[in-house]
């Protein structure tokens, strides 16, 4: 775990960079410079603001990726725990199950393994692909749920 100060700085990274960019802009406008130095300082300011935008975007992407990794790990753990329970129940009831019940248990186990495999492959790219395929359907379903009646 990060130290408290580092954690607080990371939480407000975008704000800190934006404030520093604004402060530099204000200082450059208040300082009386000759025309050549003023132009050079404003070029530097534009570069700084571009860097700030890039850094904020990069930080945001990394934060989302880290969050997705944590969520994926949690879901994998939960699915694998349920899969373990299902396997142990199936093993203890092996002799008591008829053919149709064995088939149902096998299908449930295959489905749980498939979910576990899908979770291990979850990424920002797979999320984008899924949204491009099914986003319109999900959006319609949400609108349908929100409509009165």
Image (cartoon, rainbow, N blue to C red):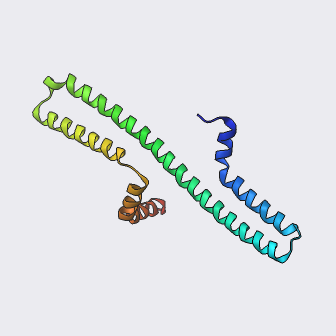
Q: Residue at x 60, y 61 (%)?
A: 54
Q: Residue at x 45, y 59 (%)?
A: 145
Image spot of residue 89 (x, y percent): 25, 26
Specify the quadrant of the image occupied by residue 83. top left
Q: Residue at x 87, y 67 (%)?
A: 30
Quarter of the picture containing the N terminus is top right
Specify the quadrant of the image occupied by residue 102. top left
Q: Is residue 146 left or right of residue 22?
A: left
Image spot of residue 148 (x, y percent): 49, 62
Specify the quadrant of the image occupied by residue 4. top right
Instruction: Return the residue nearer the eye: 66 or 111.
Output: 66
**Residue farthest along the front direction in this orientation:** 36
Q: Is residue 60 left or right of residue 96?
A: right
Q: Is residue 141 left or right of residue 94?
A: right
Q: Residue at x 41, y 60 (%)?
A: 128
Instruction: Return the residue nearer the eye: 149 or 87.
Output: 87
Q: How many marks?
A: 0
Q: Would you place residue 129 above or below residue 121 in this image?
A: below
**Residue farthest along the bottom direction in this orientation:** 35
Image spot of residue 136 (x, y percent): 40, 66
Instruction: Return the residue nearer the eye: 39 or 100.
Output: 39
**Residue farthest along the right direction in this orientation:** 32
Image spot of residue 108 (x, y percent): 24, 39
């Amino acid at each position: 775990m990060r130290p408290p100060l580092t954690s607080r700085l990371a939480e407000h990274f975008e704000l800190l960079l934006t404030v520093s960019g604004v402060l530099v802009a204000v200082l450059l406008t208040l300082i009386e410079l000759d025309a050549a130095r003023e132009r050079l300082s404003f070029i530097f300011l534009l570069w700084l603001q571009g860097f700030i935008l890039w850094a904020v975007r990069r930080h945001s992407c990394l934060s989302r990726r880290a969050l997705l990794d944590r969520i994926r790990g949690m879901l994998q753990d939960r699915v694998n725990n349920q899969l373990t329970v299902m396997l142990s129940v199936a093993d203890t009831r092996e002799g008591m199950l008829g053919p149709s019940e064995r088939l149902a248990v096998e299908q449930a186990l295959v489905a749980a393994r498939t979910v576990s495999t899908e979770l291990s492959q979850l990424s920002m790219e797979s999320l984008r692909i899924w949204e491009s395929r099914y986003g319109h359907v999900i959006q319609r379903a949400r609108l349908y749920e929100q409509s009165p009646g």
